[in-house]
Amino acid sequence: MKIISGIFEGSVLQRGQDNLCEVEIEVQGAKNLTCSIGELEQKSDSVWIFRGIPSGGPYSVTFSDGLEEITVHDFYIGDVWVLGGQSNMDGSARVTAEDLEYAKNPQTEVRAFYMDESWRPACYDMHNKLIAKEQPYIDSCVRWVEGIERSGIRVYDAPPYRLRRCVGPGVAFAREMFRLTGGVPQGLIPCAVGGAPIEMWLPTGDSSENYYTAALHRIKLCGNRIRGMFWAQGEGNPNWEIYPEQIETIRSGICKQTGMECLPFVQLQSFRCTMDRTEEAAFGWSRFREMQRRMQEQCLCLATIATNDCSLDDGIHLDSASQQKMGVRGANAMYHLVTGCGFAQPTIESISAMPEQFVPDSFTVLKIRYKNLDGALRSLGVPNGFTMSRAEEKPSNYHLCQMSLHQNEVHILVEEKPENLKDYQLWYGFGHDFYCNITDGAGRAIPAMGPILLRDYLEKQCNK
C-alpha cells in the first residue's frame, strides 16, 4: 500500500466552507481503506475523499486496508494557494539579512510544497528549480543555468546563485493570510517560472507538458483542492489584447479539475522598469496595465493590485522589501475576494471638470474621485504621476499646472478650457520608468491607468 497523492508528512490540506477538510487522496494497492481520524468516501478504485477534520494541526492519521497501515504525521488543515506566473512571483529579488533571519525560524503553520514535492515551512527558496521533479521545471532550469553561466556566473558556487536571488511575494502573502484568518494554517504551491510566456500557461490540447499541466499535477498531488491563485505575469507580453481571455482559460481549467465554481485570482499589475525601451513599447506596457486594471471590473473574483510605488533590484525585478509589500497587499486583496471583509481595490468612481474660479476661460479643475479607499488619499511630497495626451500624442504634464489631494479626490489644475478637455486622454503612470506617489490612508497605491478617455466621463457629467 502506498500513498500516491493528497496527503504527505507536513501537508496543508484545503478546508471547505464548513471549516473541515475535504481533499482527494490516491492510495495504490488498497481496496478497503479506513482512517484513524476523519472520514473516507471512495470515489474510484484508488481515490478516496478524505474529510471531516477541522482547521488547525498538526495532526496525525493512520490509514489501514486491514493488512497494512500507513501513518502520516504533522499535517495541517487550512487554506492552499497556487503561486503562478513569471520571475517576480518565482522570485528574483536579492536575499536580505531579514530573509535569512526568518529562514532560521520560519512559521511552522505557513508551509510550501517545494519543487522536490515535499512539504516544509515556506521560505524564500521555495521556487528552487534545482531540485524540481516535474519535467517542464527541469527543462526551464537547464535553460536558465546555461544562460546564467554564459554570462560568467557560476550557478553552483556556494551558496548557489539561485539561492542568492530568489525572493518573491509568496511568503509574505501566506504570513499575512495567516494573520488575517486568525491563525488558520496556510499552504503554498509554488508553480511560477521566470520568463515564462503566457502560452506556456495555457492548456495544450494534447499530451504535451508545459507549466499549466505541471501546475495541475502539483495541485493534484496536494489533494486537488485549493482556495485561490496569486499571479504575477505579463511584462513585455506582446498579445496584451487577448490576455484577459488567456487568464480566464487558465482559471476555468483549474476550476474544472478541482471542482470549483470560480477561482479567486489576485494579480500584480505590471510595474515600472528602467530598461531601455521604444516609445511604442511604452504605450504597449501602459495599455497592458490599463487592461489589467479593467479586468477586475469584468470578473467579481479577480483583483488587480497596484505596484507603481515599488522599488527595483534591477531593470525589471522588484527588490525584497517591495516583494514583501506586494505579498501583504495581495493577501489583503485575496482576503476581500474570499470573505468580503476589508476593502476592494481603489478605483475611479467619477471624473468631473469645473472652470477655475479666477480664470474660468482658460483654466479648468479636473476632479478624479476614487472609491474603495481605506482612508483619505495622501502622497509623500507633491502628488505626482498624472499626464495627459490628445489622440496618439505621447502623454506629458505640459498642461498640468498643479495637483492636490482632497479626501477621496485628486484635483488637477489644467491650463485648458473646460470644453476642450473632452479631446484629451488621462494617464497615471505612463511608460517605463515613471514616478507615482499617491496612496490611500492604509498605504495602498492607486492603480496605474490610461488611456482614460475624458470624453466618456465628462459627457456623463453633462447629462446629469
Image: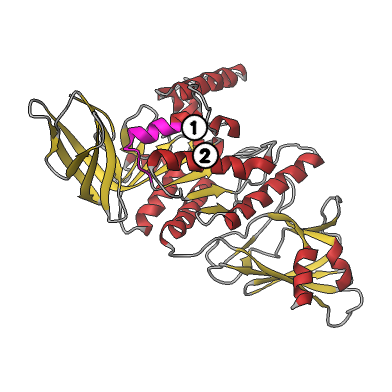
Percent across and percent down for residue 134 are 42, 24
Q: Is residue 327 left or right of residue 70?
A: right
Percent across and percent down for residue 231 are 52, 43
Q: Is residue 268 left or right of residue 328?
A: right
Q: Is residue 128 left or right of residue 18?
A: right
What's the amino acid at mark 1?
Tyr
* 420, above or below 284, in the image: below
Q: Quadrant of residue 376?
A: bottom right
Say which label, 2 or 1, has the lower sequence index: 1
Percent across and percent down for residue 334 are 46, 54
Q: Is residue 331 left or right of residue 345?
A: left
Who's the residue at 72% across and 48% down the image? 287
The residue lying toward the viewer, choosing from 24 and 105, is 24
What's the amino acid at mark 2?
Ile
Task: Indicate yes or no whether the magenta region holds residue 185.
Answer: no
Direction bottom: furthest residue? 358
The residue lying toward the viewer, choosing from 51 and 135, is 51
Q: Which mark is residue 226?
A: none
Q: Which residue is mark 1?
A: 212
Percent across and percent down for residue 95 are 48, 37
Mark 2 and mark 1 in contact? Answer it, CB < 8 Å: yes
Direction right: furthest residue? 361
Helix, strand or loop under label 1: helix
Who's the residue at 31% across and 35% down the image? 119
Q: Could you tell me if residue 401 is visible in this image?
A: yes
**Looking at the figure, which quarter contains the N terminus?**
top left
Q: Which residue is mark 2?
A: 250
Task: Indicate yes or no whether the magenta region holds residue 224.
Answer: yes
What is the magenta range? 215-226
Q: Could you tell me if residue 96 is visible in this image?
A: no
Helix, strand or loop under label 2: helix
